[in-house]
Amino acid sequence: MANPILGRCPVCGEALQVTELQCRECDTTIQGRFELGPFQRLTAEQLAFVETFIRCEGKITRVEQELGLSYPTVRNRLNEAIRALGYEVEEEEEFALSPEERQAILERLAKGEISTDEAIELLRVR
């Protein structure tokens, strides 16, 4: 069994570069500088998380169940992996309303004091 390829130097943590490829069958060797690809930038833990995420078809609730993690923890790990792959993460906006304020709006809607459209507008994150 082959060892997994390292993407980062175990001494300093910088990215490693592949400089030689060899065919197992005919022993042909090619030398040069080859890119490892973006997934080699991930730590072992990040790669395991991404594999779980893909296996769960990107459904965060399934990832939560499989790993026994909370929604915020799953989101944080996903964001870390996205950043490690070199992409920017669009931060989720904080809720401007407290849970009590949200509940009060929903109660007003249930009582017929406001319309559905008014409730949606009041519940929107500002």
Image (cartoon, rainbow, N blue to C red):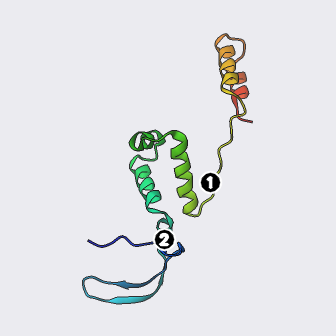
- Would residue 3 be found to the left or right of residue 120 on screen? left
Q: Residue at x 45, y 41 (%)?
A: 64
Which quadrant would the N terminus be assigned to in this image?
A: bottom left
**18 horizontally vs 25: left or right:** right
Name the amino acid, label 2.
Gly
State the residue lying farthest toward the top. Answer: 111
Provide residue 84's location: percent of width, then percent of height: 55, 62
As drawn, 114 above or below 39: above
The kind of residue on which mark 1 rests is Val
Instruction: Name the one closer to the observer, 73 or 86.
Output: 73
What secondary structure is marked by label 1? loop
Q: Position of residue 4 (x, y in %)?
A: 36, 70
With respect to residue 73, does 49 lie above or below?
below
Position of 58 compared to 3: left or right?
Answer: right
- Check residue 89 in the rendering and tell me which mark sits there, or answer none: 1
Which label is found at residue 39? none
Q: Residue 110: name its quadrant.
A: top right
Q: Is residue 10 above or below residue 44?
A: below
Residue in view at x 41 percent, y 56 percent: 48
Q: Which mark is residue 37?
A: 2
**Hey, which quadrant is residue 44 in on the image?**
bottom left
Q: For the C terminus, give its image quadrant.
A: top right
SS of the residue under disc 2? loop
How far separated are the C-alphas under marks 2 and 1? 20 Å
Packing grade of label 2 (10 A; few <14, some 14-19, many >=20) is: few
**Location of residue 30 (image quadrant):** bottom left
Q: Answer few, some or many: residues within 10 Å of disc 1's Cα (few below 14, many 20 plus, some between 14 and 19).
A: few
Residue found farthest to the front: 11
Position in image of residue 13 (x %, y %): 53, 72
Q: Earlier in the sequence, mark 2 or mark 1?
A: 2
- The residue located at (71%, 35%) in the rendering is 125
- As displayed, is residue 14 above or below residue 43? below
